[in-house]
Image (cartoon, grey):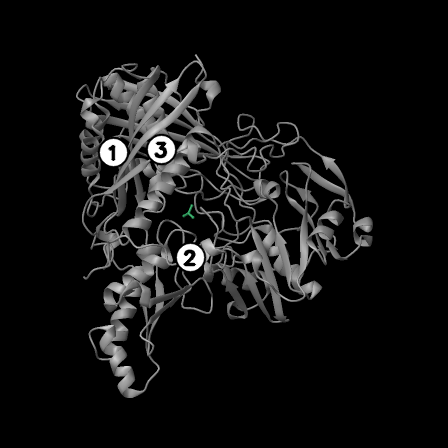
C-alpha cells in the first residue's frame, strides 16, 4: 500500500457543493416541467365522505387534480426488502380511508409551483372523523397485521436464554428502570422531492434522492408496470438522508404515476411541514432495563423490554434489543420487542436504528449500576466485555473495544474523575464527566465497479453506489488511487446513476465496506488487462498502441466469513458537561470519541462521520422531540423553527481517535462501517455526565431545561 490510504483527503465533491454546481434532484431543469402540490389529511383517523375538487380544477394553470376517485394507475410491488421495497405498504390514494394526520389524499398538477399550491388549498374535504390513537399509553400493544405482502424487517419478537428471573432475584445488586426516547425526525437539509420524466410510454427517468439506486429502479419498475431497465434513476447528490431516503414514499410513487397521465415532466417537492407527517420518523420508545450483578461487578442477568409504535399501514419496529447480546457478557439474557399501532405516519430507519435508542437505555443503566457498585464506569465495562456474540455464538473479529475504553480514559484524563456526584465545579457551575460505549454491526453487500484508464492520464471510476453526504466519492477515489498508484486528483468518480454498475445501498454504514473491495478488484483487473503493474505504465502503453482506454469491471460480495465471525465496530465516548441548576442550562463542553472501525480509508471524512454522529446525538439528547396533537393527531412540530436541532453554539470541539488494525476477516481492505456508530451512546454519555455533575438521574429524552431546574 502506498501513500494515500489513511491520510486526510478533502472531499472530491466539496468544491461542487460549495460552488452550488452539485445538482440535487429537484433542481434539474427540464423543458416543459409541471409542478405538483400534495393535498394532505387534516384528520388522523377516519375517512373521506366527500372530496370536492371542482374549484381547484378551475383555478388558473391547473392541469389535473388526483384523488382516490381518479388515482393514477399504480401496481402493487413485491415489497420485499431484498429486492424492491416501499416505505409504506398501502399504496397512495388507494381508497378513502385516513390512517394518520398528514396522509396524502390528493395531488394537484399545475404549470407553476405557486398555482399548484394555491389550488391544493381549494380542495374541499368532508371527513368522517374518528378519534385518533396518538398516545402510546392508550395504544394497544399487539402484533400488528401486515397491511399486505411482506412486512418490514423487524417485527415483534421475544427471546430468552438462561433463567433471568431467578438470576435477578439472587443478584447482589439489581438495577431496574424505565428509559424513554421521543419521536424524532430525520430533518435532512434537502427536502424530499422527485422529478419524473416519461420519455415514451415505456421509459421514465426519475430524479430523486435515493440511498439505493438499483432497489429504486426495480421498485419503480414494479409500481409502474415496467421492467427495471425501462426506469432510469439519477441521484448523484443527496442532501442528507439518515435512513429516510432508501425507498419510495407515497408522494414519490404518486408523482411517478401521475407524470405518465399528464404526459409532462412532473416535479413534486414535499414541504417541510408535510415531511414531518408523511416521510418517516424514528418512533418514540419506552424501554425497561433490568440488570443483575455480583458484588465484584459482573453482570448476572440482563432483561431488555422495548415498546415502540408503528402506523396502521405498515410495520416498523425500532429494533432496540439488537445491540443487547453484542455489548456485554451475561449468562441470563431476556429480550422483548412490543409494537403499538397508532394513527401516525409509518416510522422507519433513522441513523443507527435500534442501536441508538437501545444503547441510550442500556448505557444509562450501566452507569446506574456503576454508581450502585461504587465502581468506575469504565472499569465496569471492562469487567463485562464479551468476546462472542451472545445470540449467534460467534467470536468477534478484530475487536478493540477495551482499547477504546482505555485509550479514551487516558486521553480524557479520566483517572482524575472523582467517583461522587457534585464533586466538580467551575466558575459557579456544576461540572460532570460521563462516558458510554458504542457499537454498530459491520455490514457489507455485493457491488460492481467499472474502471477506465484513459489516454489523458486519468482514471475514471464508475458505480451506481452513491454518496448521501458521507464521503463515498472521496473514499472510492482514495481506494483507486492506492491500487493504481495515482494521485487522488487524477481519479474521476461517477456515482448515483442506474446506468452505472450496481453499487449496493448507502445504508447500514456499508457503502465503504461494500464498494471499496469492488474498487480494489476493478483497479487490479484493469492493470491486468493492460498487462502492467501501475496506471502510469498503462498510460504509456495507451500512447504506444494509440488506444483511448483500458477498461475493466469487477464484482465483489461477502463470502463465508459471516459463518465464522461476528463483525461489529466499537467505540467509547467521553464528555464533560456544565450545569447551571438555576436556569436549567446544560452545556456540553468537551467531547472525545475513540473508535475501532478496522482500516480508516480517509482520516478526514472518517473523523467527520463520527463527529456528525456525535452532533446528531447531542441534538437528540438535549433537543429533538416530535409532538402529535392529542386531539387532531397532527404533528405540531412541523418545521426547523419548532423542531429544535443543535446549532454550532451547542457543540464543543469533538476529538476523534481511531484504534485497532484492519479487519481483514471482513473484507480485503479491512474497513468496517463508521457512518452510524458515532451517534450510538452519545445521549447516555451526556445523561451520565449530568448525573455526575448534579446527582440527578434523567431517564427521559430529550433532556430539556424544564427537567433540569431544581
Ligand atoms: Mo441508515 S438508518 O442505514 O440510512
For the residues labelled 3 and 1, say whether their Cβ atoms are less than 8 Å apart: no
Instruction: Give residue 11's position: percent from left, percent from top.
Output: 36, 55
Q: Is residue 340 left or right of residue 429?
A: right
Queried on whether the Cβ of the residue with tag 3 lies below 8 angstroms from ligand 1, the answer reads: no
Residue 412 rendering spot, x and y as whole percentages: 23, 31
**Numbered label attached to residue 458:** none
In the rendered image, the vertical position of residue 598 relative to residue 578, given as above or below: below
The residue singled out by tag 1 in the image is: 328
Whichever of labels 3 and 1 marks the residue nearer the N terminus, that label is 1
Residue 89 appearing in the image: yes
Q: Which mark is residue 652?
A: 3
Query: Closer to the camera, 708 or 370?
Result: 708
Q: Which residue is rendered at x = 79% and y = 50% of the image?
A: 56
**What is the CA distance from the residue labelled 1 to the residue labelled 2?**
44 Å
Identity of the residue drawn at 82% across and 50% down: 54
- The residue sitting at 31% across, 33% down in the picture is 591
Residue at mark 3 to residue at mark 1: CA–CA distance? 30 Å
Q: Secondary structure at mark 3?
A: loop
Above or below, 406 relative to 275 = above
Where is residue 161 drawn, in percent x and y?
Answer: 28, 34
Nearer to us of marks 3 and 2 is 2
Mark 2 sits on what residue?
15
Question: Which of the two residues, 593 or 165, is positioned nearer the viewer here?
Answer: 593
Does label 2 point to a residue whose CB lies under 8 Å from ligand 1? Answer: no
Q: Secondary structure at mark 1?
A: loop
Task: State the image coordinates of residue 190 (x, y, percent, origin top left).
Answer: 52, 49
Cα gap from disc 3 to disc 2, whole angstroms? 26 Å
Q: Quadrant of the C terminus?
A: top left
How many residues crowd around disc 2 within 10 Å: few (fewer than 14), some, or many (20 or more)? few
Marks 1,2: beta carbons within 8 A: no
Q: Is residue 37 above or below residue 498?
A: above
Amino acid at each position: 500500500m502506498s501513500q494515500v490510504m489513511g491520510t486526510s483527503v478533502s472531499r472530491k465533491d466539496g468544491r461542487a457543493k460549495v460552488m452550488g454546481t452539485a445538482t440535487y434532484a429537484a433542481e434539474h431543469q427540464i423543458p416543459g416541467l409541471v409542478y405538483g402540490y400534495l393535498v394532505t389529511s387534516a384528520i388522523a383517523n377516519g375517512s373521506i365522505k366527500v372530496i370536492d375538487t371542482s374549484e381547484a380544477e378551475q383555478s388558473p394553470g391547473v392541469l389535473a387534480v388526483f384523488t382516490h376517485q381518479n388515482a393514477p394507475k399504480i401496481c402493487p410491488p413485491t415489497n420485499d426488502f431484498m429486492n424492491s421495497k416501499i416505505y409504506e405498504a398501502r399504496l397512495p390514494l388507494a381508497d378513502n380511508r385516513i390512517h394518520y394526520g398528514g396522509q396524502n389524499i390528493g395531488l394537484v398538477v399545475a404549470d407553476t409551483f405557486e398555482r399548484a399550491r394555491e389550488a391544493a388549498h381549494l380542495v374541499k374535504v368532508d371527513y368522517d372523523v374518528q378519534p385518533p390513537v396518538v398516545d402510546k399509553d392508550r395504544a394497544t400493544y399487539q402484533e400488528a397485521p401486515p397491511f399486505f405482502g411482506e412486512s418490514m424487517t423487524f417485527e415483534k419478537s421475544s427471546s430468552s436464554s438462561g433463567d433471568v428471573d431467578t438470576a435477578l432475584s439472587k443478584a447482589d445488586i439489581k438495577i431496574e428502570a424505565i428509559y424513554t426516547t421521543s419521536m424524532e425526525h430525520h430533518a435532512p437539509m434537502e427536502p424530499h422531492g422527485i422529478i419524473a420524466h416519461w420519455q415514451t410510454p415505456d421509459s421514465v427517468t426519475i430524479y430523486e434522492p435515493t440511498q439505493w439506486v438499483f432497489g429504486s429502479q426495480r421498485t419503480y419498475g414494479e409500481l409502474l408496470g415496467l421492467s427495471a431497465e425501462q426506469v432510469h434513476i439519477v441521484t448523484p447528490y443527496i442532501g442528507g438522508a439518515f435512513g429516510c431516503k432508501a425507498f419510495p414514499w407515497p408522494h414519490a410513487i404518486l408523482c411517478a404515476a401521475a407524470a405518465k397521465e399528464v404526459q409532462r415532466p412532473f416535479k413534486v417537492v414535499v414541504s417541510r411541514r408535510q415531511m414531518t407527517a408523511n416521510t418517516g420518523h424514528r418512533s418514540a420508545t419506552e424501554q425497561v432495563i433490568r440488570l443483575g450483578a455480583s458484588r465484584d461487578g459482573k453482570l448476572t442477568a440482563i432483561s431488555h423490554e422495548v415498546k415502540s409504535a408503528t402506523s396502521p399501514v405498515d410495520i416498523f419496529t425500532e429494533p432496540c434489543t439488537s445491540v443487547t447480546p453484542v455489548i456485554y457478557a451475561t449468562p441470563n439474557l431476556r429480550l422483548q420487542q412490543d409494537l403499538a399501532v397508532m394513527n401516525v405516519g409509518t416510522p422507519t430507519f433513522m441513523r443507527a436504528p435500534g442501536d441508538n435508542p437501545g444503547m441510550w437505555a442500556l448505557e444509562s443503566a450501566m452507569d446506574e449500576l456503576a454508581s450502585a457498585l461504587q465502581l468506575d464506569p469504565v472499569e465496569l465495562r471492562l469487567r463485562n466485555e464479551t468476546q462472542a456474540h451472545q445470540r449467534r455464538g460467534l467470536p468477534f473479529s478484530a475487536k478493540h473495544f477495551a482499547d477504546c475504553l482505555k485509550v479514551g480514559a487516558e486521553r480524557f484524563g479520566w483517572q482524575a474523575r472523582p467517583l461522587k456526584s457534585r464533586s466538580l465545579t467551575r466558575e459557579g457551575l456544576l461540572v460532570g464527566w460521563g462516558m458510554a460505549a458504542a457499537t454498530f454491526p459491520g455490514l457489507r453487500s455485493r457491488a460492481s465497479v467499472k474502471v477506465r484508464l484513459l489516454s489523458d492520464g486519468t482514471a475514471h471510476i464508475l458505480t451506481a453506489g452513491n454518496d448521501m453526504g458521507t464521503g463515498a466519492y472521496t473514499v472510492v477515489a482514495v481506494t483507486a488511487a492506492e491500487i493504481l498508484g495515482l494521485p487522488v486528483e487524477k481519479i474521476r468518480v461517477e456515482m448515483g446513476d442506474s446506468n452505472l454498475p450496481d453499487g449496493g445501498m448507502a445504508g447500514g454504514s456499508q457503502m465503504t465496506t461494500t464498494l471499496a473491495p469492488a474498487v480494489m478488484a476493478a483497479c487490479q483487473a484493469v492493470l491486468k488487462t493492460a498487462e502492467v503493474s501501475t496506471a502510469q505504465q498503462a498510460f504509456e502503453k495507451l500512447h504506444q498502441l494509440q488506444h483511448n482506454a483500458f477498461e475493466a469491471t469487477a464484482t465483489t460480495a461477502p463470502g463465508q466469513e459471516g459463518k465464522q465471525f461476528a463483525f461489529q465496530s466499537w467505540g467509547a465516548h467521553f464528555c464533560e458537561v456544565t450545569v447551571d441548576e438555576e436556569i436549567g442550562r446544560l452545556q456540553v463542553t468537551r467531547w472525545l470519541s475513540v473508535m475501532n472501525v478496522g482500516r480508516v480509508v480517509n482520516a478526514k471524512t472518517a473523523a467527520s462521520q463520527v463527529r456528525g454522529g456525535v452532533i446528531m446525538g447531542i441534538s437528540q439528547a438535549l433537543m429533538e422531540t416530535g409532538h402529535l396533537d392529542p386531539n387532531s393527531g397532527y404533528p405540531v412540530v412541523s418545521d426547523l423553527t419548532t423542531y429544535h436541532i443543535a446549532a454550532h453554539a451547542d457543540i464543543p470541539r469533538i476529538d476523534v481517535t481511531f484504534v485497532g488494525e484492519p479487519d481483514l476477516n471482513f473484507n480485503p481492505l479491512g474497513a468496517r462501517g463508521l457512518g452510524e456508530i458515532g451517534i450510538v451512546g452519545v445521549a447516555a454519555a451526556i445523561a451520565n455526565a449530568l448525573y455526575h455533575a448534579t446527582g440527578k438521574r434523567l431517564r427521559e429524552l430529550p433532556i430539556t431545561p424544564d427537567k433540569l431546574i431544581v
